[in-house]
Image (spheres, rainbow, N blue to C red):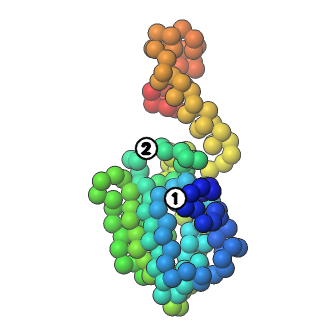
């Protein structure tokens, strides 16, 4: 994600195929990253393609019920059923729910005769819109960030002060959208 001690290379997951080409690695490990990429379809495709036939893909990701943890942002939640569908073109060796926090662990092997499954119409649960959707818009992200900052600010302001500085319609909207 960024250069630092012990980091050999930095590469956006959307650019894996451009950087390394298809069938480049025997093993690909991806931990706690999938929920943070806006274009998850491209990243999932790249992860599948960059693994050699017969190679292993291991990843972990978060499911619904896991808190928003935006670094740099947080978009999606994957259920076991989502992962089963999204990686049905791999031979699944392990697919389990995280026993300690809402999340998924996956281990799959790329078939020798791999044919990638199209995912264009598959909706995922969005932390931004709080529903299953095909994607999130720039407007939705901006609105979420704005409300998230207001919520963070509101949590630090005593209720009496909040009532004094925010008009009633704004307070009601904040309560409804942010569930304060």
The residue sitting at 60% across, 66% down in the picture is 8
Which-is-in-front pick, marks 2 and 1? 1
Q: Which of 81 and 58 is in front in this view?
A: 58
Mark 2 vs 1: CB contact within 8 A: no
Q: In this view, does 46 lie to the left or right of 61?
A: right
Q: Splitting the image into 4 quarters, where does residue 58 fall?
A: bottom left
Q: In this view, does 119 lie above or below 76?
A: below
Q: In this view, does 82 lie to the left or right of 140?
A: left
- Which of the two labelled residues, at mark 2 and mark 1, occupies the earlier sequence position? 1
Q: Distance between the residues labelled 2 and 1?
A: 15 Å
Q: How many marks?
A: 2
Which residue is denoted by mark 1 in the rendering? 33
- Dot 2 surroundings within 10 Å: few (below 14), some, or many (20 or more)? few
- Residue 34 seen anywhere in this rendered image of the structure: yes
Q: In this view, does 153 lie to the left or right of 9?
A: left
Instruction: Say the numbered circle drawn on residue 67.
Output: 2
* Quadrant in the picture for the C terminus: top left
* Quadrant in the picture for the N terminus: bottom right
- Dot 1 surroundings within 10 Å: few (below 14), some, or many (20 or more)? some
Q: Splitting the image into 4 quarters, where does residue 96 fall?
A: bottom left
Residue placed farthest to the bottom in the image? Answer: 113
Q: In this view, does 172 lie above or below 127?
A: above
Instruction: Say the numbered circle drawn on residue 164.
Output: none
The residue sitting at 69% across, 73% down in the picture is 19
Q: Position of residue 120 (x, y in %)?
A: 61, 67
């Amino acid at each position: 994600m960024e250069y630092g001690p012990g980091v050999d290379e930095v590469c956006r997951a959307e650019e894996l195929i451009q950087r390394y080409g298809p069938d480049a690695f025997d093993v690909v490990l991806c931990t706690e990253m999938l929920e943070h990429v806006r274009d998850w379809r491209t990243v999932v495709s790249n992860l599948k393609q960059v693994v050699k036939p017969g190679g292993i893909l291991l990843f972990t990701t978060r499911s619904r019920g896991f808190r928003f943890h935006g670094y740099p942002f947080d978009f999606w939640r994957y259920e076991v059923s989502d992962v089963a569908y999204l990686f049905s073109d791999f031979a699944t060796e392990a697919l389990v729910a995280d026993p300690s926090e809402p999340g998924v662990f996956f281990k799959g092997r790329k078939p020798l005769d791999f044919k990638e499954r199209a995912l264009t119409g598959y909706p995922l649960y969005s932390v931004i819109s709080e529903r299953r959707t095909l994607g999130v818009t720039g407007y939705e992200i901006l609105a979420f960030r704005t409300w998230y900052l207001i919520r963070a600010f509101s949590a630090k302001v005593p209720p009496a002060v909040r009532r004094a500085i925010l008009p009633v319609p704004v307070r009601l909207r904040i309560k409804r959208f942010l569930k304060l």
